[in-house]
Image: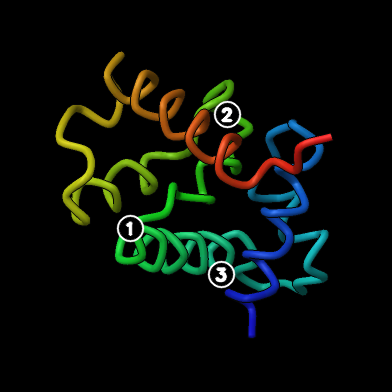
């Protein structure tokens, strides 16, 4: 199932310490057009629901928009808002701060200690 493959790809991504993009994830997962980015974003949002329900940091924070320099697309923030963990303007400075904090939580939670 795409969501499980995506979860593993993001856990693997944490080990690099680098962020990834929606497009790169689609390629890594071998998704074929049409709607590859849409399928990735739907799976990311589903992962967010699972993570919040389980009390884990949101792995989806590892995936950022190519257009938005270092933060996820608007849907990440809208989903976080719907899940009750974010309540600000998705385009405002609070969004960048929220993402940075969530990213630190993800890295601390999943990072393999050397």
Mark 2 is surrounded, within 10 Å at the Cα level, by few (under 14), some (14 to 19) or many (20 or more) other residues, namely few
Left/right placement of residue 32 relative to residue 87 reads: right
Quadrant that contains the N terminus? bottom right
- Nearer mark to the viewer, of 1 and 3: 1
| Secondary element at tag 1 | helix
User: What kind of colouring is applied to the model shown?
Assistant: rainbow
Q: How far apart are the two marked residues, 1 and 3, measured between alpha carbons?
A: 20 Å
Q: Is residue 101 above or below residue 15?
A: above
Q: How far apart are the two marked residues, 2 and 1, measured between alpha carbons?
A: 26 Å
- Provide residue 89's location: percent of width, then percent of height: 20, 27
Which label's residue is closer to the chain start, 2 or 1?
1
Q: Nearer the viewer, residue 41 or 7?
A: 7
Looking at the image, do the residues carrying marks 3 and 2 touch, with CB atoms under 8 Å apart?
no
Left/right placement of residue 113 relative to residue 49 reads: right
Residue shown at 74% from the left, 31% from the top: 18
Quadrant that contains the C terminus? top right
| Secondary element at tag 2 | loop
Residue shown at 37% from the left, 48% from the top: 75
Q: Nearer the viewer, residue 104 or 81?
A: 104
Return the residue at label 1: 52
Residue shown at 51% from the left, 68% from the top: 43
Q: Is residue 35 above or below residue 9?
A: below
- Provide residue 29's location: percent of width, then percent of height: 78, 67
Left/right placement of residue 51 relative to residue 106 reads: left
- Nearer mark to the viewer, of 2 and 1: 1
- Provide residue 68's location: percent of width, then percent of height: 52, 26
Which label's residue is closer to the chain start, 3 or 2?
3
Return the residue at label 3: 39
């Amino acid at each position: 199932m795409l969501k499980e493959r995506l979860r593993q790809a993001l856990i693997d991504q944490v080990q690099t310490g680098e962020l990834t993009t929606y497009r790169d994830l689609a390629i890594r997962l071998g998704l074929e057009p049409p709607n590859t980015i849409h399928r990735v974003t739907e799976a990311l949002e589903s992962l967010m629901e699972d993570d919040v329900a389980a009390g884990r940091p949101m792995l989806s924070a590892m995936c950022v928009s190519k257009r938005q320099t270092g933060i996820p697309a608007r849907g990440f923030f809208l989903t976080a808002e719907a899940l009750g963990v974010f309540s600000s303007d998705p385009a405002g400075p609070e969004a960048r701060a929220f993402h940075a904090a969530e990213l630190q939580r993800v890295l601390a939670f999943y990072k393999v200690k050397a």
